[in-house]
Amino acid sequence: MSALERDHYEVLGIGKTSSKIDIRNAYRKCAREAHPDTAPGFAAGSTTNASARMAEISQAWAVLSDPVRRRQYDAVSASETETSETETSETETSETETERETWQFVERAKFPWRFMLVLLFAGIIVVLALDVTSKPAVPAGPDGLLGSGSCIVVDANLTAVEVRCEEAHDGVVQQLVGFDMACPPDTEAIRDRQGMGLACVVRN
């Protein structure tokens, strides 16, 4: 806004805190008063002045009725207007409130480190407690199905029976093959008690 332009609020005769409804009502009132065809205060030879006044009112309405343009206008006006003691006080108060709001926002936006640390320690304690109180896993027993790595004993019928590897056993199955197949030379072929084939056993 140049120094020659009148303040839009002054043109409409309203304050800077006026609502949109106040701005609209002020615009309509000023437009009726200043319109070249209806203005009672303008003589026949003052049409030019009336047109200029109407243009001034229309410009003020176009800016102040648009929220975005109004904010921009207010920002420019504030930067170009010479500050009196009252305006300085109001500006400082406004800036202080803005800084306080900004600071409060920053305070609220801080990451909750303490809360997260408490959760972390609580989680560690729970894990340790569960580890201490939990019973050691019991190794699964043999399922009777021979496979690579199964520990076996040879029963009275000369068949392979799976047992726990922690117990005494005669050997370990290297692989299980069909009855019509041969085991590798370094293993002994023992019939599976379940009839699944031949267990190629590495003897102890």
Image (cartoon, rainbow, N blue to C red):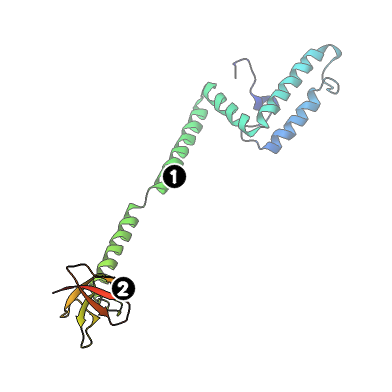
The image quarter containing residue 55 is: top right
Kindly identify which numbered label has been placed on residue 180: 2
Please tell me which residue lies in front, 138 or 153: 153
- 10 Å crowding of disc 1: few (<14), some (14-19), many (20+): few
Outermost residue on the bottom side: it is 156
Q: Earlier in the sequence, mark 2 or mark 1?
A: 1
Side of 132 relative to 93 (left or right): left
Q: Which residue is pictured at 44% across the width and 40% down the height?
A: 102
Where is residue 118 drawn, in percent x and y?
Answer: 31, 59
Side of 95 relative to 149 (left or right): right
Q: Nearer the viewer, mark 2 or mark 1?
A: 2
Please tell me which residue lies in front, 7 or 129: 129
Q: Which residue is mark 1?
A: 105
The image quarter containing residue 184 is: bottom left
Name the amino acid type tagged 2.
Asp
The image quarter containing residue 174 is: bottom left
